[in-house]
Image (cartoon, rainbow, N blue to C red):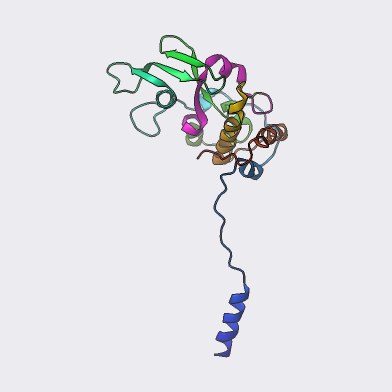
């Protein structure tokens, strides 16, 4: 009996350890990411990341799913079961401009928010084919945007390119943080510094899941 009482007293003195729920605060998540230099680009090609797949098996590829999500006034190509977007209108998050989309004219690109080559140089070179396909088709990492700004961005990270529309920058960098956290990618020190600078202007910014 004495041993049971002593054991009970001992247990009451041990603090209960409860796992904290993952934070959705962008700055907190950013600080959880590893910081390293960019790895070599050796071996990178876009073909390493199979994209415009139909990973959710809804019958539409990831490109058209993104257009359907981000555009309004949609018109679909006949006979595609509302999968192939023929025309629509985009309020471009990078510029704030309204852009008319037509499948016959290149005015809108689907941007990989964390560029595929950037992903390659910050950890994705070690991914298997399936995981690379996932990041290339993940709605979290895809945005319909002005094609000229997408090409201006290239493979830049937050240290080298930010959307001209300053009011969107908090959402933009927090989405990059969310993608990097989801896939276990790292950030470079200049990239982290640039993101911190943005997030300090929008305290409490949440990441998307």
Give the percent coordinates (x, y) of residue 180: 58, 37
Q: Is residue 10 above or below residue 110?
A: below
Instruction: Examine the rendering and report whether any part of residue 138 can be seen.
Output: no
Q: Is residue 6 left or right of residue 137?
A: right
Give the percent coordinates (x, y) of residue 9: 60, 81
Nearest the camera: 130 or 18?
18
Nearest the camera: 18 or 168?
168
Residue located at (46% from left, 26% from top): 51
Tell me which segment is drawn in magenta.
135-160
Residue reaching furthest bottom?
1
Q: How many marks?
A: 0
Tell me where residue 169 sits by quadrant. top right
Residue located at (58% from left, 87% from top): 3
Q: Is residue 74 above or below residue 159?
A: above
Residue located at (32% from left, 16% from top): 77
Tell me where residue 41 sits by quadrant. top right
Residue reaching furthest top?
105
Residue reaching furthest left?
79
Residue located at (56% from left, 61% from top): 18
Give the percent coordinates (x, y) of residue 190: 72, 32
Tell me where residue 64 sits by quadrant. top left
Q: Is residue 166 above or below residue 187?
A: above
Q: Quadrant of the N terminus?
A: bottom right
Q: Is residue 130 above or below residue 82?
A: below
Nearest the camera: 193 or 48?
193
> Is 76 contained in the magenta span?
no
Nearest the camera: 169 or 145?
169
Instruction: Examine the rendering and report whether any part of residue 130 can be seen.
Output: yes
Give the percent coordinates (x, y) of residue 97: 53, 17
């Amino acid at each position: 009996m004495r041993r049971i009482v002593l054991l009970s007293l001992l247990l009451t003195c041990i603090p209960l350890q409860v796992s904290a729920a993952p934070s959705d605060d962008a700055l907190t998540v950013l600080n959880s990411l590893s910081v390293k230099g960019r790895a070599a680009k050796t071996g990178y090609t876009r073909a390493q990341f199979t994209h415009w797949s139909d990973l959710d098996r809804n019958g539409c590829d990831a490109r058209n799913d993104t257009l359907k999500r981000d555009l309004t006034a949609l018109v679909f190509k006949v006979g595609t079961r509302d999968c192939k977007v023929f025309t629509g209108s985009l309020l471009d998050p990078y510029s704030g401009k309204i852009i008319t989309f037509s499948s016959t004219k290149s005015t809108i690109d689907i941007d990989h928010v964390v560029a595929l080559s950037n992903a390659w140089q910050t950890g994705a070179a070690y991914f298997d084919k399936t995981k690379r396909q996932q990041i290339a088709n993940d709605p979290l990492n895809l945005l319909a945007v002005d094609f000229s700004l997408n090409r201006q961005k290239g493979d830049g990270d937050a240290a080298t390119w930010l959307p001209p529309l300053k009011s969107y920058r908090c959402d933009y960098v927090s989405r990059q943080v969310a993608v990097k956290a989801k896939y276990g990618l790292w950030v470079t020190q200049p990239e982290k510094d640039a993101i911190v600078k943005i997030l300090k202007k929008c305290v409490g910014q949440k990441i998307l899941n």
